[in-house]
Image: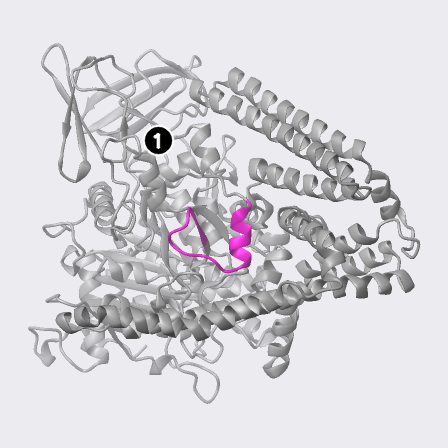
């Protein structure tokens, strides 16, 4: 289907990059090749756009960070006359810290005497943990002393800056110098990569200090102006004239009157728009009105406080001539904070949205109404592997890193992160708990397949899992090098949505329960999708059957395909591998497709193009006819006035949105989006039955005695009561897509401060995510967690010395976290004297704990053995680092892209030839044959027959030594 548009009788949902002979190349592959320089496909305009978005983010980040710095500057200016002459804070803090360290042991001894007898009776002594907690306070005391010393130093820094400014530079020159310095420092991450050894460490420390010094400099500069504004030794300039003009009480009053009016107009416009579009409920209108009232009252209170301050200072005959400017700065800080809290989502200020859109425009593809390849906009996660339309796509797991630099778990001291996934049905990880993807997409609409793909490839972020550099975090945050994203904590989100249920699942503080769904729930739902997929394969799954129970076991016979990280390089190599597997008839056997970083470009493209076999929307205008009596399917026929017809086949459990006689237009949905049924299909009486685990069963009994049953989880908000009468089409559950829910879970500016200070953990309202390669770059740990019998890894990461860092991380993590051991010999892949490997792949054996049988791993490595064709050889001659060019190179040309894709195809074909030496079997391999071939190849390479066979019976005796 890939050589022309899938229209009419042609099938949607087939593998989109099938290898074809002659000029009829897949149009999707042609699009890929033409857009392999996706970040700057438009040339100069795209480069300028990147720069503009970076600058916009820096500006908004500055607005977020300014309020506390402005308050600090005002406090410093008020205390300046006293601190300039006296040391008032440091001695007190030092005395308290010293007293704490010297006197606390006495109190501890008295406490121990009181508890001594109890300690003898219990046979335990907690003095070790007690001493540990006590000694930790020494560090806190030291930090307080250092902070106090810095605070005492600030007035002197104000003096130094004032005299330097007055004698040497004007204000606008300082601003110009600062801007130039920021522009140069924006290139710091790239400069660090060019440096090595000690110089790189020195540069990293210097940049880290800049991240600390910049906020201090802002406080000092603003405090200097507040203290000395109007003094004759301050060089006059535009900024000074402007601030001097604003240092009048009437301007402060104007700010406090105009600002609430602006907020009132904004909220009023939102309310009017919401009324016209039906966005807000009555409760939400009341909340908006209360918010508006709170803003007005806040400003009235501020005006009153200002009036009191001036009255008191006048009565006490205190000079208040400079108070208006200081109060103006305080008021400006408050207004900026209020503006940020109401309007700023820090995900929107990062470069994630640009990155997401560039990736989507290159890799998330479809066919438009004119039959041309086009970009698919905002593909929902719930539409992947769309069972109701007959999809046979593998279940896609998008791997990302959950950043936990601030977690108290000592087990994360090296990783600084944990595993986290996006998938069709669930989002989350074991530390946060899981939420349903539909819940996340309703409340937090930023999440979809494009954003998941971009997060999984968010290589440049302040916090980067194992790769985090603490010295650079604050600086990278300030200059907006932020591809990572914040999303609502999945477990907390799901529990929040269940708050309406009496005795709901929200955990009590300290009960140790992980909120949201558990992995057992996730895996059970995935097995249901796998079962449906097998039924919809052309061979009906060829007799494959899941084992009893819903726990992970190798007996389920699951197969997983993993695409590694490595940017466009990995995507191109793995594309060739996938093409070779598809040509051999093996791709259809994979139940899971797990991706990370660049491998996600390919995985997301495949998932998008294979997500349904029958369109869920009408292609033409016409009248609907529904026939639900054709086997186990529902048939929707749309007949146009000119006689043209379209037939759409859906599964028996698809929820149709149309009835016979309805009129539809192009693009109108014919079936509801995936997820629990929302509306009743019939008239009747409702019966609600609570089940174990908080599940709920809703039964609708028709007047004629017919029964329709609907199953919901403990998180679904039922819109019906037991005994209630309901009509067909009325809702059974309430969707959580209200304005209130979305506003409450919007990522507010405080998250930027958490990101800058590395205070990231699994318990916060939001969690920070970045490139999945920051914890595991082969996208395989989740396949091992599900105990797949067969796993194929396409490794396209940058590894010029063949050190196998990604695989070593996987082996170690699987052993520590899951108790899984993988036996694998990598010697054939290591570089020889001529810089070539002797093989393109190796086979490993997976030993799952407590299992009676093993799984098998086919590890396909980006490598050259000297047997590659001329296209590959010519490019390697031109670029000797091929196939391990830097991941920083994301702007591939035609020759570069084709060399990597062709290498991947070659590697895949070599592996297939080793598995199936008889050409006649190519394209006809069953799942059982695939597993048997891989098992036989393992035993052949390790000189041992498969269990139950004699060495002379081995069918693989004639296998080539690939």
The one of 717 and 374 positioned closer to us in this rendering = 717
Residue 577 image offset from top left, x and y in percent: 39, 62
The one of 951 and 68 positioned closer to us in this rendering = 68
Residue 734 image offset from top left, x and y in percent: 32, 25
Query: On the rendered structure, is 437 left or right of 692?
Result: right
Q: How is the image coloured?
A: one colour
Instruction: Find the magenta span and give its range.
Output: 749-768
Q: Give the residue drawn at x 37%, y 69%.
A: 133
Furthest-bottom residue in this view: 833
Residue 153 image offset from top left, x and y in percent: 70, 66
Residue 753 lies in the magenta stretch? yes
User: Does the rendering let one see residue 802?
Assistant: yes
Say above or below: 653 vs 32: above
Say above or below: 944 vs 550: below
Furthest-front residue in this view: 316
Residue 609 image offset from top left, x and y in percent: 41, 43
Query: On the rendered structure, is 701 left or right of 500?
Result: left
User: Does the rendering let one see residue 612?
Assistant: no
The one of 659 and 839 positioned closer to us in this rendering = 659
Task: Count the labels in the image.
Answer: 1
Q: Give the residue drawn at x 86%, y 39%.
A: 245
Report which quarter residue 844 is drawn in: bottom left
Report which quarter residue 793 is drawn in: bottom left
The one of 264 and 361 positioned closer to us in this rendering = 264
Residue 263 lies in the magenta stretch? no
Query: On the rendered structure, is 503 left or right of 411?
Result: left
The quarter of the picture where the C terminus appears is bottom left
The quarter of the picture where the N terminus appears is top left
Q: Which residue is mark 1?
A: 673
Say above or below: 670 vs 119: above
Circle 1 — which element? loop
């Amino acid at each position: 289907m890939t050589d022309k548009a899938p229209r009419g009788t042609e099938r949607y949902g087939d593998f989109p990059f099938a290898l074809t002979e002659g000029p009829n190349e897949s149009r999707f592959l042609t699009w890929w090749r033409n857009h392999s320089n996706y970040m700057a496909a438009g040339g100069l305009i795209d480069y300028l756009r990147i720069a503009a978005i970076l600058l916009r983010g820096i500006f908004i980040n500055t607005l977020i960070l300014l309020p506390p710095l402005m308050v600090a500057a005002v406090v410093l200016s008020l205390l300046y006359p006293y601190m300039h002459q006296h040391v008032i804070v440091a001695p007190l803090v030092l005395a308290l810290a010293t007293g704490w360290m010297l006197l606390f042991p006495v109190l501890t001894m008295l406490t121990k005497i009181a508890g001594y007898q109890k300690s003898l009776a219990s046979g335990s002594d907690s003095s070790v943990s007690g001493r540990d907690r006590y000694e930790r306070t020494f560090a806190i005391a030291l930090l307080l002393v250092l902070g106090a010393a810095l605070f005492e130093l600030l007035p002197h820094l104000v003096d130094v800056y004032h005299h330097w400014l007055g004698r040497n530079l004007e204000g606008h020159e300082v601003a110009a110098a600062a801007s130039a310095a920021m522009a140069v420092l924006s290139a710091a991450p790239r400069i660090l990569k060019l440096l090595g050894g000690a110089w790189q460490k020195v540069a990293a420390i210097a940049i880290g200090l800049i991240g600390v010094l910049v906020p201090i400099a802002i406080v000092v500069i603003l405090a200097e102006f507040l203290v000395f504004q109007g003094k004759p030794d301050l060089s006059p300039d535009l900024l000074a004239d402007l601030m001097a003009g604003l240092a009048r009480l009437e301007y402060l009053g104007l700010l406090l009157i105009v600002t609430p009016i602006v907020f009132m107009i904004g909220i009023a416009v939102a309310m009017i728009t919401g009324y016209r579009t039906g966005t807000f409920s009555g409760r939400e209108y009341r909340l908006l009105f209360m918010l508006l009232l709170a803003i007005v009252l806040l400003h009235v209170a501020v005006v009153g406080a200002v009036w009191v301050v001036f009255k008191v200072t006048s009565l006490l005959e205190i000079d208040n001539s400079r108070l208006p400017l200081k109060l103006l700065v305080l008021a400006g800080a408050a207004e900026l904070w209020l503006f940020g809290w109401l309007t700023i989502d820090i995900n929107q200020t990062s470069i994630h949205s640009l990155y997401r859109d560039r990736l989507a425009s290159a890799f998330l593809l479809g066919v438009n109404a004119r039959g041309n390849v086009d970009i698919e906009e905002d593909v929902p996660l719930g539409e992947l592997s769309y069972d109701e339309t007959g999809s046979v796509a593998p279940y896609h797991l998008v791997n990302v890193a959950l950043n936990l630099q601030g977690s108290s778990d000592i087990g994360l001291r090296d990783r600084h992160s944990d595993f986290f996934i996006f998938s069709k049905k669930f989002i989350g990880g074991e530390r946060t708990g899981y939420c349903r993807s539909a819940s996340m997409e309703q409340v937090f609409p930023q999440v979809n397949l494009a954003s998941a793909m971009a997060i999984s490839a968010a290589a440049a972020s302040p916090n980067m899992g194992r790769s985090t550099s603490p010295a650079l975090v604050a600086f990278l945050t300030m200059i907006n090098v932020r591809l990572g994203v914040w999303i609502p904590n999945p477990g907390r989100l799901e529990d929040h949505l269940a708050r309406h249920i009496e005795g709901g699942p929200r955990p009590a503080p300290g009960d140790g329960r992980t909120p949201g769904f558990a992995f057992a729930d996730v895996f059970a739902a995935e097995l249901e999708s796998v079962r449906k997929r097998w039924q919809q394969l052309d061979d009906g799954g060829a007799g494959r059957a899941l084992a009893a129970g819903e726990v992970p076991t190798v007996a389920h016979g699951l197969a997983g395909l993993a695409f590694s990280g490595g940017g466009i390089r990995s995507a191109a190599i793995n594309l060739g591998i996938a093409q070779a597997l598809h040509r051999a008839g093996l791709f259809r056997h994979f139940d899971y497709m797990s991706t990370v970083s660049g491998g996600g470009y390919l995985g997301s493209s495949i998932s998008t193009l294979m997500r349904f076999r029958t369109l869920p929307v009408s292609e033409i205008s016409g009248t609907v006819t529904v026939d639900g009596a054709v086997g186990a399917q529902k048939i929707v026929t749309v007949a146009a006035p000119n006689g043209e017809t379209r037939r759409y086949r859906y599964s028996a459990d698809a929820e149709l949105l149309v009835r016979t006689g309805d009129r539809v237009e192009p693009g109108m949905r014919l079936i509801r989006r995936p997820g629990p049924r929302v509306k009743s299909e019939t008239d009747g009486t409702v019966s609600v039955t609570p089940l174990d685990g908080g599940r709920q069963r809703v039964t609708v009994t028709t007047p004629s005695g017919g029964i329709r049953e609907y199953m919901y989880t403990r998180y679904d908000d039922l819109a019906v009561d037991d005994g209630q009468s309901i009509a067909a089409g009325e809702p059974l559950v309430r969707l959580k897509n209200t304005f209130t829910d979305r506003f409450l879970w919007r990522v507010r500016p405080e998250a930027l401060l958490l990101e800058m200070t590395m205070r990231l953990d699994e318990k916060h309202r939001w969690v920070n995510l970045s490139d999945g390669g920051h914890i595991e770059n082969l996208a395989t740990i989740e396949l091992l967690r599900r105990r797949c019998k067969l796993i194929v890894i396409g490794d396209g990461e940058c590894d010029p010395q063949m050190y196998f860092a990604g695989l070593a991380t996987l082996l170690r993590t699987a052993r520590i976290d899951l108790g899984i051991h993988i036996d694998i010999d990598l010697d054939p892949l290591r570089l020889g004297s001529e810089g070539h490997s002797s093989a393109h792949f190796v086979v490993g054996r997976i030993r799952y704990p407590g299992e009676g049988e093993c799984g098998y791993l086919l590890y396909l490595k980006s490598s050259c053995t000297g047997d590659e064709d001329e296209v590959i050889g010519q490019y390697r001659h031109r670029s000797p680092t091929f196939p391990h060019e830097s991941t920083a190179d994301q702007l591939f040309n035609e020759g570069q892209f084709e060399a990597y894709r062709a290498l991947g195809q070659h590697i895949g074909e070599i592996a297939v030839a080793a598995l199936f030496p008889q050409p006649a079997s190519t394209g006809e391999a069953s799942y059982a044959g695939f597993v048997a071939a891989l098992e036989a190849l393992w035993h052949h390479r390790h000189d041992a027959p498969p269990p139950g066979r004699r060495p002379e019976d081995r069918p693989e005796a004639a296998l080539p030594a690939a």
